[in-house]
Image (cartoon, grey):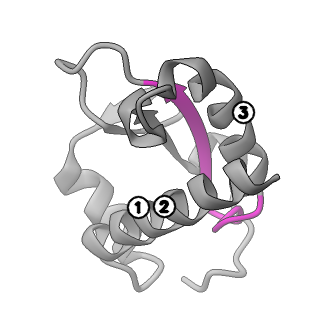
Amino acid sequence: MKDATIISNEKKLSVLYRVEPGCLGPDGMNYIKDFCEYACDKFMNHHDSYVSYEFTPRFDKSLAEMEYSINQKRLNTEKAGQYMSLFAQTLTSFEDDIEEQITSLIDTFFKR
């Protein structure tokens, strides 16, 4: 499949990304909710033909940083990787891209 293929929302990979307040600096607790909303807006068109994103604060470190699902059914990393392979991507490269984007967004968030 190509990136340009349009997939129904029920079949898109949903990525729940939990952002730790500490990544926003010592006052991160003051900014984390606004940053998560900002990240959702900025990621709206990122791989949007086959992925949807949700960003939320990570207050509980026992929860995974990233969680994957399709149509509200949770996927393990192996299944998420198989899904990404349909688009000629590895899960590792996908996660690395998200991490890079988040780092960049943190910089732009504070420069607004």
Of tags 3 and 2, the one toward the viewer is: 2
* Placement of 53 over or under 72, stated as above or below: below
How would you rate the neighbour count of disc 3 (Cα within 10 Å): few for under 14, some for 14-19, many for 20 or more? few
Farthest residue to the top: give it.
60
**In the image, residue 63 lies in the stretch drawn in magenta:** no
**Residue positioned 44% across, 38% down in the render:** 25
Looking at the rendered structure, which numbered label has been put on residue 90? none
Residue drawn at x 28%, y 13% is 60
Q: State yes or no: discs 1 and 2 in contact (Cβ < 8 Å).
A: yes
Disc 1 from disc 2: Cα separation: 6 Å
Which residue is denoted by mark 3 in the rendering?
37
Where is 68 relative to 28, above or below? below
* Segment tinted magenta in the rendering: 45-57
Structural distance between the alpha carbons of marks 3 and 2? 15 Å
Callout 3, which amino acid?
Glu
Q: Residues within 10 Å of mark 1 (few under 14, many from 20)?
A: few
Dot 2 amino acid type:
Thr
Q: Residue 97's spot in the image, x, y percent?
A: 44, 71
Q: Identify the secondary structure beneath mark 1.
A: helix
The residue located at (78%, 46%) in the rendering is 41
Residue hosting label 2:
103
Could you say which quadrant of the image residue 46 lies in?
A: bottom right
